[in-house]
Image (spheres, grey):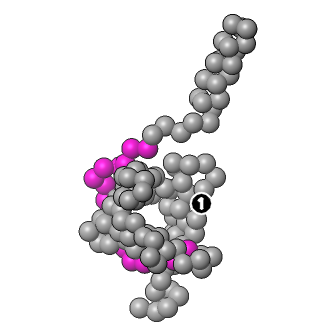
Amino acid sequence: MKKIIILTGILLVILLALFARPPIQPLGTGELDTYLVGTWLFETDIGFEYHFHQDGTGIRGWWGAQSTFTWSTRDNILSIMCDVQSLGVFAELWDYSFNGDTVTLIARHAYNMSFTFIRHDALFGG
């Protein structure tokens, strides 16, 4: 029985080492990629939006269910500090790249998570 407990503990440590993500630390005071400033709509038109402001603040979510955040960039990494009333404050890190009027975000804080957003002005004009 003792061997089973030890082997189970070792297996658990190995699994955690392989699949657990370390806590995300924000970039801190980075730069603000001015090309992100503006409104971005989720490509599947479900109503989810990002609003990146010039001062490093922003709002994201659906109409009526939005949360505020602060943001900065460095080396094509977007750092977002979210403030969600029900969850508290937490950090997200995203690799980002532009293709014309679209931006693709690939999560560094979670596995297999990427999203593409379209600049609002590209869809609806200035």
Quadrant (top left/top right/bottom left/bottom right) for the N terminus:
top right
* Residue ID at (64%, 18%): 9
Q: In the rendering, at what x and y percent does residue 13 appear?
A: 60, 23
Image quadrant in which you'd find residue 78: bottom left
- Please determine whether, in this image, residue 11 is positioned above or below residue 4: below
Foreground residue among 4 and 79: 4
According to the image, label 1 marks what residue? 114
Q: Which residue is farthest top?
A: 2
Q: Which region is colored magenta?
A: 24-42
- Please determine whether, in this image, residue 24 is positioned above or below residue 44: above
* Residue ID at (69%, 7%): 2
- Residue 16 in the magenta stretch? The answer is no
Total count of labels? 1
- Residue 25 in the magenta stretch? The answer is yes
- Please determine whether, in this image, residue 26 is positioned above or below residue 121: above
Q: In the rendering, at what x and y percent does residue 105 appear?
A: 53, 62
Amino acid carrying label 1: it is: Ser
Q: In the rendering, at what x and y percent does residue 8 appear?
A: 69, 19
Q: Which residue is farthest bottom?
A: 125
Secondary structure under badge 1?
Answer: strand
Q: In the rendering, at what x and y percent does residue 89 appear?
A: 36, 52
* Residue ID at (36%, 65%): 68
Residue 118 appears in view: no
| Mark 1 closeness class: few <14, some 14–19, many ≥20 residues within 10 Å | some
* Residue ID at (52%, 70%): 103
Residue 106 appears in view: yes
